Every structure is written in C-alpha cells, then in structure tokens.
C-alpha cells in the first residue's frame, strides 16, 4: 500500500467512522436508563433503534450520487454536521413519537456516509489493496465499541449533573464531535489523487495512472453507466448477502449492553468495559481477515468462513447456559466472525463497478443491506418480549449469518 496515502487518509477516516458509528449505536447504552425513564418496552426500543435504517435506506442512493457530483470533501462534511446536530437533539426525546422521528432523521442525515467513504477509497487504493484499506477503515465500527463502551458507561454515571439524566449527557457529548469534525473535513480531505499536492509528483502520477488503468479495464468489461449497474444481478446478490450480514451486526450491537446487563448486576461503567471485549476481538479479526484476503487475492471463502465463525459464536451463546466469562468469550467469537466479513465483502463491488455505476451500485448494496439494521434489532426486541430472554433472538441472528456463508460461496469467482 502507498504509505503516504494510507497515513494521510486512513487514520482520519477511521476517526470519522468511530464518531459516526458511535452516534448510530449509542442508543443501546442510553436504553439502560432511557427505557425506564420514558416507559419504553422492548418492542418499542427495538423498533426505534431500527427505524434509523429506514431513513438511511430512503436517502442512501441519492446521497451517494450527489457525493459523486459535488465531491467527497463537501458532502461528507455536510453529512457529519447534520447527523451531529440530530444526535444532540436525541437528548430532548420525551416519548415514542419523538424517539421514532429523531432516529429516522438520524438515518436520513447519515445516509451516504459509509458508501461514500467506500467509493472514496476506490479513488485512492488499487483493487489489490482495497480489502485491507476497507478493513482498516471499518475497524472503526469495532473500535467505536472499545472506546464508546467505557465512555458511554461513564457518561451514564453523570446522571443528575446540571439537571440532565445520564442518557441525555450521552447524546450531547457524543454528538458534538461530529459537528466539529465536519467543519475540519473541508480543510483536510482531498477529493482525488490528481489534487493531492501532499504526494510527491512521481508517486501521484504513478497512482493516478494505475487507478485509471484499472477503471478502464472495469469499464471495458462491465461498463460504467448507472442504470445498468442498479439492475445488475450481482449488485442485487451482494445486497441480499449484505442484508444478512447486517441483521447479525446490528442485532448484536444495538442489544449488547442489555445482553451484558442480564449476565449479572453491574454499574453502567462496568457494563461499558465488558462490552468493549467483543469489539476488541472484532477489531483484530477484521484487520487480520482483510490482510489475508488481499494476500491471497480471494474474497468468497474468506467471507464465508468469517460468517460461519459468527454464526457458531451466536448459536453457542444462545444454546449454552454459560457463566458470564464464557458468555463474553462466545460473544467475542461471534463479533470476530461478523466483523471479519467486511473487508472481503467490500472488496467485491470494485471488481465490476466503476464511475457512476460504482457510486450507485455501492449505495444500493449498502442501503438495501442496511435494512437488516432495522430487521435485526426489531426482531430481537419482539422475540425477547415474547420469550423473556435473548436466546431465540440470538438463534435467529446465527441463522442469518449461516445464510451469508451459503450465499457467499454461490457468488461468481471473479473479483
């Protein structure tokens, strides 16, 4: 990998996604107090946590097409500032209607961020390096749990300070950094390598030439027009596969603090520390699988193996009455498997999409896939309300990941 490009872009994009993912899932920690304060049942919480993804779905493709037209720097800044303001406004929730409305608006505000960054990485990293680049960037989703778990737990301990409940402090303190970073994006990011004056001239020319040659090869094989890409069978196959991954991801993420809470009575800060353990395992697995996938130049089997590991971890957690330490270990295995899917998965679209086709195709895959973020948490909430525990819900998530493995092995070998 080009070390200058990696050092310049990946740590900053990583930071942006840590903040984005934390603002997306911190409602899971807020629920430890919020549900009781506002009288929300499990189904209400699950629906509100998941409705974020309906807003996200509705605006994902238009947002990514705008990004391709106006440039990543301006549009990513807009996304971050707007979602930060909505996240802060979550502190004002007083009932179900406001909870649903603001979670939906948060999805609308954030729509386009992740696929925009994936598209942005295709402008900077050749195909052979993308699984590693995507894995390094997406490790933020796991590291947000490592950082955000203890942070969110500590913020809940501020309960009563200045007349605010702990969950209100959580939304305010974790929402404001998105606004500040959004302003900084305009100064720091460079839209394309052609404009990267921080790269030596010879490196810039070599990178631009290599990326241009790859784009021409993709266009010659598959074309670069938007509408054929949106109708491409492989785009829809990847969207279905991603849906199944995301059911597992957010089914766990948005309920993990409450799952850990049920393992034994602990303070909010202790719960935050324990939830960090599965996320740390996820971080290591994501980078390791991404690097190995790039070295082998293989995606399908890496994706299938990771999904099976995740399914096994969730199934074992659901089936065994394990003591708390063993339950955390099994959840860590599940998290490692789920997050290990992302590097090889997001290296696949660049193998047959370029230009506007890549902007629209990646956004479509992500938007349809993220409907799993509504399905997983809501289904888990309904099943927990019906059965009184998390076992049936975790079993459902395990089945979803097993389906990922089967679908991955049926993908075409190309890419």
Image: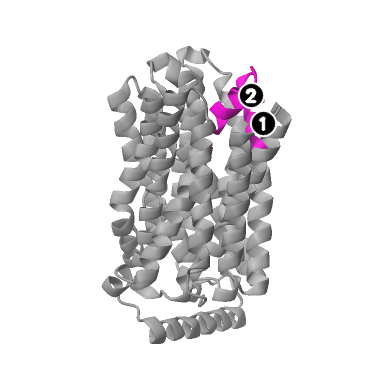
The Cα–Cα distance between marks 1 and 2, rounded to whole angstroms, is: 11 Å
Magenta residues?
Answer: 252-277
Residue plotted at (48% across, 41% down): 396
Question: Which mark, residue 202?
Answer: none
Instruction: Evaluate if marks 1 and 2 touch, with contact meaning CB atoms under 8 Å apart.
Output: yes
Element type at mark 1: helix
State which quarter of the image contains the N terminus. Answer: bottom right
Residue 10 visible in the shown view: no
Residue at mark 1: 274
Main SS of the magenta part reads: helix
Residue situated in front as seen by the camera: 339 or 324:
324
Mark 1 vs mark 2: in front: 2
Mark found first going from the N terminus, 1 or 2: 2
Give x and y (percent) for residue 117.
47, 59
Element type at mark 2: loop
Residue situated in front as seen by the camera: 358 or 313:
313
Q: State whether residue 152 is above or below residue 291.
A: above
For residue 297, side relative to residue 370 (left or right): right
Give x and y (percent) for residue 222.
38, 81
Q: State whether residue 13 is above or below residue 381.
A: below
Residue at mark 2: 263
- Whether 335 is among the magenta residues is no
Give x and y (percent) for residue 122.
49, 70
């Amino acid at each position: 990998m080009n070390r200058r490009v990696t050092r310049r872009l990946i740590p900053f994009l990583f930071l942006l996604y840590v903040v984005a993912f934390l603002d997306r899932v911190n409602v899971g920690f807020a629920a430890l107090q919020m549900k009781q304060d506002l009288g929300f049942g499990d189904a209400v919480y699950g629906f509100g946590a998941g409705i974020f993804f309906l807003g996200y779905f509705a605006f994902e493709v238009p947002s990514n097409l705008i990004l391709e037209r106006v440039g990543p720097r301006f549009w990513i800044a807009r996304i971050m500032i707007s979602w930060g303001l909505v996240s802060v406004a979550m502190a004002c929730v007083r009932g179900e209607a406001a909870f649903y409305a603001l979670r939906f608006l948060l999805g609308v505000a954030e729509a386009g961020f992740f696929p925009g960054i994936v598209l942005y990485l295709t402008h900077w990293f050749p195909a052979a390096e993308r699984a590693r680049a995507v894995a390094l960037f997406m490790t933020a989703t796991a590291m947000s749990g490592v950082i955000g778990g203890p942070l969110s737990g500590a913020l809940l301990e501020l309960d009563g300070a200045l007349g605010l409940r702990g969950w209100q402090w959580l939304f305010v303190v974790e929402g404001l950094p998105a606004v500040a970073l959004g302003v900084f994006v305009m100064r720091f990011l460079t839209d394309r390598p052609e404009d990267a004056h921080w790269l030596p001239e010879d490196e810039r020319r070599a990178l631009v030439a290599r990326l241009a040659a790859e784009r021409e090869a993709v266009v010659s094989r598959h074309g670069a027009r938007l509408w054929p890409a949106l109708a491409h069978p492989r785009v829809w196959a990847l969207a279905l596969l991603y849906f199944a991954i995301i059911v597992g991801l957010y089914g766990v993420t948005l309920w993990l603090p409450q799952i850990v809470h049920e393992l034994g009575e602990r303070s909010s800060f202790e719960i935050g520390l324990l939830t960090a353990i599965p996320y740390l395992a996820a971080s290591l697995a994501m980078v390791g699988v991404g690097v190995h996938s790039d070295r082998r130049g293989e995606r399908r089997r890496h994706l299938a193996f990771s999904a099976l590991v995740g399914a096994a971890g969730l199934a074992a957690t659901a089936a065994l009455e394990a003591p708390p330490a063993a339950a955390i270990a099994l959840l860590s295995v599940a998290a490692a498997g789920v997050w290990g899917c992302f590097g090889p998965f997001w290296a696949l679209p660049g193998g047959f999409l370029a230009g506007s086709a890549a902007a629209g195709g990646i956004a479509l895959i992500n938007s349809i896939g993220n409907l799993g973020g509504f399905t997983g948490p809501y289904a888990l909430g309904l099943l927990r309300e019906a059965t009184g525990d998390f076992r049936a819900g975790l079993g459902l998530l395990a089945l979803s990941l097993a389906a990922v493995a089967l679908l991955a092995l049926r993908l075409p070998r190309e890419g």
